[in-house]
């Protein structure tokens, strides 16, 4: 979320950084240091700003609150945009978000739910078969 954190991430060998929002200074420094950055975006204005900053990926946050329809709607004006759905994602709602245009669904707390793990594994297997 800050340039200081970007420097720390780089020093620690991070392959990329992720933030809940979009900060141009963080984007610029990440690019300068060669550390890809994934900013959060929840509005078309934030997506436009990310695009102007040279980014082709954004983290839609909080995705569960935005809803799957948001992803489909954003692909209209931003057809080349790649979006990661984060916030409230789990094995039960991930297929809906992927079908609506999310490129990736990131799960967090679902990984702590023993009932979710087999369902998540099945989704990953299905995705791998689809790629083949």
Image (spheres, grey):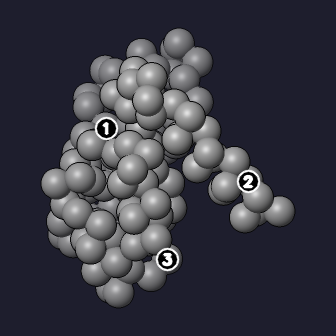
Position of 33 with respect to 43 (left or right) is right
The spot of residue 92 in percent (x, y) is 39, 50
Residue farthest front in this picture: 115
Contact check, label 3 and label 2, Cβ < 8 Å: no
Residue 128: mark:
2
Callout 3 crowding tier (Cα within 10 Å): few <14, some 14–19, many ≥20: few
Q: How many numbered marks appear?
A: 3
The spot of residue 28 in percent (x, y) is 39, 45
Residue 80: mark:
3
Can residue 91 be seen in this snapshot?
Answer: yes
The spot of residue 85 in percent (x, y) is 37, 53
Contact check, label 2 and label 1, Cβ < 8 Å: no
Q: Earlier in the sequence, mark 2 or mark 1?
A: 1
Q: Which residue is drawn at 39% across and 63% down?
A: 97
Q: In which quarter of the image is residue 60?
A: bottom left
42 or 132, nearer to the observer = 132
Marks 2 and 1, how far apart in space? Answer: 28 Å
Q: Which of marks 3 and 1 is nearer the N terminus?
A: 1
Can residue 29 be seen in this snapshot?
Answer: no
Q: In which quarter of the image is residue 42?
A: bottom left
Residue 19: mark:
1
In the displayed structure, 58 sits above or below 19; it is: below
Position of 124 with respect to 30 (left or right) is right
Q: Determine whether the residue tagged by mark 2 lies in a helix, strand or loop.
A: helix
Q: In which quarter of the image is the C terminus?
A: bottom right
The spot of residue 2 in percent (x, y) is 26, 29
Q: Determine whether the residue tagged by mark 3 lies in a helix, strand or loop.
A: loop
Between label 2 and label 1, give the one nearer the viewer.
Answer: 2
124 or 17, nearer to the observer = 124
Q: Which residue is drawn at 19% across and 60% down?
A: 66
């Amino acid at each position: 979320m800050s340039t200081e954190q970007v420097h720390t991430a780089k020093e620690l060998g991070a392959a990329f950084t992720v933030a809940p929002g979009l900060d141009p200074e963080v984007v610029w420094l990440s690019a300068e240091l060669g550390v890809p950055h994934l900013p959060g975006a929840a509005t078309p204005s934030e997506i436009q700003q990310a695009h102007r900053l040279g980014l082709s990926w954004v983290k839609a946050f909080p995705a569960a609150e935005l809803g799957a329809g948001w992803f489909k709607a954003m692909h209209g004006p931003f057809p080349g945009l790649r979006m990661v759905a984060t916030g409230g994602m789990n094995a039960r709602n991930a297929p809906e978000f992927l079908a609506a245009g999310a490129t990736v669904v990131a799960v967090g707390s679902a990984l702590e739910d023993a009932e979710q793990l087999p369902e998540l594994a099945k989704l990953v297997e299905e995705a791998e078969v689809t790629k083949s």
